[in-house]
Image (cartoon, rainbow, N blue to C red):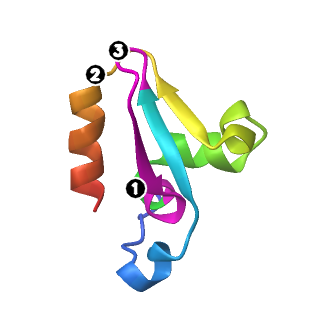
Amino acid sequence: MRKRKNLTNIRFLGSDTVSLCTTSSSESWKIHRKLLVSKCKALESAFSHDFPERSSGQYIFNQTTHDTVARFIEWAY
């Protein structure tokens, strides 16, 4: 299993942001792309390969609550 690298703030704070949304809320969360892909392999694939998320800069969670996404972002930072 590939070990995930821990990024220092300097390495990800200058990166672009992407949006994380849920179908249960009209709000979205912004997160630094480099930080996100360092924490979640599935989202790394979505934002790095030929998926709609790569061009839109937005990932929509269909079966996850807005609060759960917020807790994930808190954990990531």
- When the figure is inspected, residue 41 is found, relative to residue 8, above or below; the finding is above
Q: Which amino acid, mark 2?
A: Thr
Inspect the magenta stretch and tell me whether residue 35 lies in it. yes
Residue that carries the numbered disc 3 in the rendered image:
24
* 47 in the magenta segment: no
Residue drawn at the location 29% of the way across and 57% of the way down:
76
Which of these two is toward me, 36 or 57? 57
User: Disc 2 to disc 1, how far (Cα)?
Assistant: 19 Å
Q: Secondary structure at mark 3?
A: loop
Of circles 2 and 1, the one toward us is 2
Residue type at mark 3 is Ser
Q: Start and end of the magenta stretch?
A: 22-37
Percent x, y of residue 44: 56, 49
Disc 2 designates what residue? 65
Q: How many marks?
A: 3
Q: Answer with mark 2 or mark 1, whichever residue precedes in sequence.
A: 1
